[in-house]
């Protein structure tokens, strides 16, 4: 059983005290219990306990009577299973226990998409975290294999390539203290993530022993902020601003922690001769365009604002030397970094900003607008959206005017986000569906690329001599082609790369630090090196590796800012290579490293043939417009059974009327219970069938055995039983994680799955080839957008405000002194006595300090001004006093 308490809504400083309290509580509870439990294990406020069944109530009463401030609730095992956090504890008939990973019924297996704009380390962390959890929690090897396979399938759906799983596994197995080069950490910095730039900064920081973390530039919370009055430009504080000249291209960039209006008034005063703006007006006799003053950036921190100002200055100038077209800067001579800014650091900064500008403005490394014949254009990612007949392409994610299976959700690796020409089936050349209802599809007029990839051992290699690029730019070029700068993992592979790149060589995808840490850009393990004798030299900072010219494939470490040729490497796709092919009528799913053959829209697979929807496949039984099949091999949970049906082009059987019920009951041959397409969520008051039909809990037909059902969320199954020597089948509901056989259904008639609308709280419903997709409103998730998101779990409220979750939204209960949606804005109506006290207290302190200082100075001056006679007289008085004479004093 699991004991849970809800008494832990405490300030952040309290967990240590709370843990001490619980340790004392546990000691008292167990030592004084009349029947102590066999096992007691706690994590925060959840406790797993093993106790005799007949003693559970007695033990619960005992622990609830120890302290009136803390009460426990109980969750007992069901069918030999008990969830504890992310662990499912199983009890065998002999009493032994084993564990698997537990997922809630609402779990969707949706993780960070591999194609998203996030650092690669975050995506590797997703793989490692899930696999580590499986290795730690799961106790049986067979269950561990199934869990790893489940993780692999779920992440593959999110676009994760196979090599990432192998790399993560190998790196985990090689992480021992003996083979790790340890670098003393000197601190941690957090920088915005900009692909291609942030990685370079991370390597520079890492070479100095500084850990680097990435933070996103755009977040939902930042973009969807609470509406409030916008602060006027001239009232902003902590700004980096830009003042242009009205008569020439000269500009001034400065920063100010005060309101911008006050700083501009200083620039306008003719007497302020130290201002570069005033100097420019006096010398050139020009006018300043005060109406076009711009706020370029904003930061309340002095150091950060200085760095932002330096960046904006570099955007106005293209070198480190002062130009005539710039007024100067207010922070000339300001030390932005401890010590002086060296020419190299300045050059690197300008290079980074120039690179960012080139990518944003000029688009220097966009994928080529041509395709490779060896792939039939399957990897074409150009922006052509018109067919060779002049027709506009239909967006891939729409089903009008032509219905089709090629959506971005179904084929995330095929570049189907918009209406550009693509080749998702790998045949002939790039094409698209047209917006003309009378023309289903046409090919696009995309030219062939001049050079080809070279194929070796499951990978493509490409040698690029034009353009010659720096290491980072070359790696970005390779990523635009779907790969990375090449890695080498054997002498044979390195020899092949040299045959491609000889005699001039060029960049390969390795970097090395002066602490001798080697890294491949594609995150594969460093298990092979081929350096020229005397190399590498381990220069200061980070060096990049290249094939040495005319040295037979040996490597050399050189400056990463050198410009040279390079070799790209990407995974070899079996579908696009022509080595494998699907039968006629099929299309090939070009998932990385593997392939699957699917039937086109409006057909189903029957062996090696795609047939029209007019007959059932072999082994399936037909009823009206559907085909049914019972699967009695492996047993699966409800979600896994549904996924297996989907791979057959089917769904779990939708038993929504009496004729289907009688057919399925007579068709079922197994003597075990089987899953059907039926789910229940509390609050709906009805079951949801797999075809989107809502069904009452007792529709008036069939046999429903719901005596043990407590109207919690669950999944429906068909119960096999016997009554009066006759086989009967009844409906029941249980936990969706129970593993059973199942019945799948193929619909022979394609219908609009969005009619009637199956989505509860959705913006729209998108009809798919085999099902539908609900696009949920903010605050709702789930397959049907029927699960409320608890926004309070992400702690959106600031300044210790309490968060109240509502249906589809949340509210922050602000403490005194704060307001706004997130309680982040200080209230303006501060009480007068608070303001008065805040002003008077510092004045009193200053006055007291002044009095003390003045008194001390007077005392010191009085001592220095005493005459010798007075001193002798004073000493004589002391002697008299020592002889018993009374002291004499004067005022």
Image (cartoon, grey):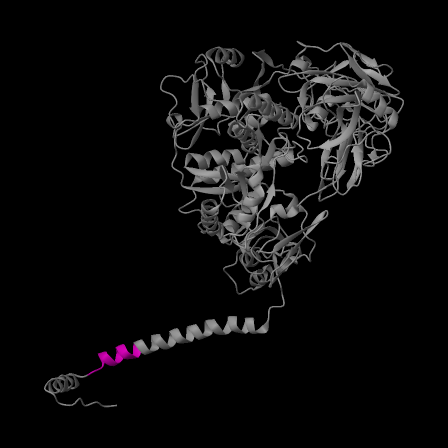
Q: Look at the picture and state if 753 lies above or below 216.
A: above
Q: Nearer the viewer, residue 662 or 374?
A: 662
Q: Position of residue 96 (x, y in %)?
A: 53, 27
**Which residue occupies the extreme front position in the image?**
724
Q: Nearer the viewer, residue 655 or 860?
A: 655
Q: Residue 109, located in which quarter of the rendered image?
A: top right
Q: Position of residue 333 (x, y in %)?
A: 44, 51
Q: Position of residue 165 (x, y in %)?
A: 56, 23
**Residue drawn 86% across the image and 14% down it:** 615
Looking at the rendering, the stretch of residues picked out in magenta corresponds to 857-866
Q: Main secondary structure of the magenta part?
A: helix
Q: Nearer the viewer, residue 90 or 866?
A: 90
Q: Position of residue 401 (x, y in %)?
A: 86, 27
Asked if the magenta segment contains residue 698, the reply would be no
Q: Residue 651, located in which quarter of the rendered image?
A: top right
Note whether residue 816 is visible: yes
Q: Nearer the viewer, residue 231 or 5?
A: 5
Q: Look at the picture and state if 614 lies above or below 294.
A: above
Q: Look at the picture and state if 469 lies above or below 820.
A: above
Note whether residue 467 is visible: no
Left or right placement of residue 695 versus residue 118 in this view: right
Q: Which image quadrant: the C terminus?
A: bottom left
């Amino acid at each position: 059983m699991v004991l849970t308490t809800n008494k832990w809504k405490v300030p952040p400083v309290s967990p240590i005290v709370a843990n001490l309290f619980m340790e004392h509580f546990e000691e008292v509870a167990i030592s004084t219990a009349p029947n102590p439990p066999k096992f007691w294990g706690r994590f925060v406020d959840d406790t797993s306990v093993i106790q005799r069944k007949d003693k559970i109530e007695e033990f619960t009463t005992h622990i609830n009577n120890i302290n009136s401030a803390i009460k426990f609730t109980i969750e007992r095992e069901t069918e030999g299973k008990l969830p504890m956090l992310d662990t499912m504890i199983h009890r065998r008939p002999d009493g032994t226990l084993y564990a698997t990973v537990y997922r809630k019924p609402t779990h969707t297996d949706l993780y960070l998409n591999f194609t998203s704009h996030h650092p690669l380390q975050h995506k590797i962390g997703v793989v490692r975290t899930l696999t580590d959890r499986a290795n730690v929690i799961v106790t049986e090897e067979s269950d561990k294999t199934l869990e790893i396979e489940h993780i692999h399938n779920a992440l593959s759906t999110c676009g994760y390539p196979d090599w990432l799983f192998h790399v993560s596994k190998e790196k985990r197995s090689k992480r021992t203290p003996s083979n790790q080069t340890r670098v003393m950490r000197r601190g941690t910095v957090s920088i915005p993530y900009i692909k291609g730039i942030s990685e370079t900064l991370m390597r520079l920081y890492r070479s100095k022993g500084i850990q680097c973390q990435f933070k996103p530039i755009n977040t939902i919370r930042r973009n969807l902020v609470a509406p409030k009055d916008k602060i006027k430009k001239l009232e902003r504080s902590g700004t980096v601003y830009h003042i242009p000249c009205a008569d020439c291209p000269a500009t001034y960039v400065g920063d100010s922690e005060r309101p911008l209006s006050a700083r501009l008034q200083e620039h306008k005063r003719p007497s302020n001769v130290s201002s570069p703006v005033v100097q420019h007006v006096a010398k050139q006799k020009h006018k300043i365009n005060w109406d076009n003053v711009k706020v370029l950036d904003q930061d309340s921190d002095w150091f950060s604002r200085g760095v932002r100002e330096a960046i904006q200055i570099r955007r106005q100038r293209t070198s480190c030397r002062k130009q005539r077209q710039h007024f100067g800067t207010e922070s000339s001579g300001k030390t932005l970094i401890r010590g002086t800014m060296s020419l190299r650091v300045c050059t690197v900064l300008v290079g980074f900003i120039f690179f960012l500008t080139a990518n944003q403005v000029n688009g220097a490394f966009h994928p080529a607008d041509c395709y490779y014949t060896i792939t039939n254009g399957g990897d074409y990612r150009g922006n052509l959206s018109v067919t060779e007949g002049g027709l506009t392409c239909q967006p891939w994610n729409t089903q009008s005017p032509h219905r089709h299976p090629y959506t971005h959700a179904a084929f995330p690796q095929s570049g189907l986000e918009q209406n550009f020409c693509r080749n998702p089936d790998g045949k002939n050349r790039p094409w698209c569906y047209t917006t003309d209802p009378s023309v289903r599809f046409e090919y696009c007029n995309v030219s062939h690329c001049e050079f080809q990839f070279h194929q070796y051992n499951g990978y493509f290699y490409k040698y690029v001599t034009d353009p010659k690029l720096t290491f980072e730019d070359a790696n970005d070029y390779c990523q635009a082609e779907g790969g990375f700068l090449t890695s080498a993992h054997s002498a044979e592979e390195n020899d092949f790369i040299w045959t491609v790149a000889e005699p001039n060589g060029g960049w390969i995808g390795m970097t090395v630090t002066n602490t001798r840490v080697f890294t491949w850009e594609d995150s594969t393990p460093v298990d092979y090196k081929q350096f020229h004798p005397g190399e590498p030299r381990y220069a200061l900072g980070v060096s990049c590796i290249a094939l040495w010219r005319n040295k037979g494939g040996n490597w050399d470490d050189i400056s990463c800012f050198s410009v040279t040729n390079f070799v790209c490497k990407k995974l070899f796709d079996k579908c696009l290579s022509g080595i494998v092919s699907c039968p006629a009528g099929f299309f090939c799913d070009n998932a990385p490293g593997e392939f699957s053959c699917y039937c086109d829209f409006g057909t189903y697979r029957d062996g090696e043939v795609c047939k029209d929807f007019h007959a059932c496949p072999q082994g399936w039984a037909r009823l009206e417009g559907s085909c049914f099949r019972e699967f009695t091999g492996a047993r699966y949970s409800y979600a896994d059974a549904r996924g297996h049906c989907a791979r057959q082009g089917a769904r779990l059987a939708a038993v929504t009327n009496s004729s289907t019920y009688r057919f399925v009951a007579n068709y079922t041959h197994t003597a075990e219970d089987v899953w059907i397409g039926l789910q229940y969520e509390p609050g709906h008051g009805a079951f949801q069938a797999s075809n989107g039909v809502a069904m009452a809990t007792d529709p008036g037909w069939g046999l429903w055995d719901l005596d043990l059902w407590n109207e919690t969320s669950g999944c429906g199954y068909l119960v096999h039983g016997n009554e009066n020597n006759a086989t009967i089948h009844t409906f029941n509901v249980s936990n969706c994680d129970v593993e059973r056989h199942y019945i799948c259904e193929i619909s022979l008639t394609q219908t609009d799955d969005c009619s009637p609308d199956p989505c509860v709280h959705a913006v729209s419903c998108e009809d798919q080839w085999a099902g539908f997709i609900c696009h949920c409103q903010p605050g709702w998730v789930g397959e049907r957008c029927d699960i409320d998101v608890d926004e309070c779990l992400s702690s959106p409220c600031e300044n210790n405000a309490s968060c109240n979750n509502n249906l589809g939204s949340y509210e922050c209960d602000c403490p005194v002194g704060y307001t706004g949606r997130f309680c982040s804005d200080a209230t303006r109506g501060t009480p007068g006595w608070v303001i008065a006290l805040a002003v008077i207290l510092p004045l009193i302190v200053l006055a007291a300090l002044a009095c003390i200082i003045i008194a001390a100075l007077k005392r010191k001056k009085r001592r220095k001004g005493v005459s010798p006679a007075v001193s002798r007289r004073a000493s004589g008085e002391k002697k008299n006093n020592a002889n018993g004479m009374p002291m004499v004093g004067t005022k």
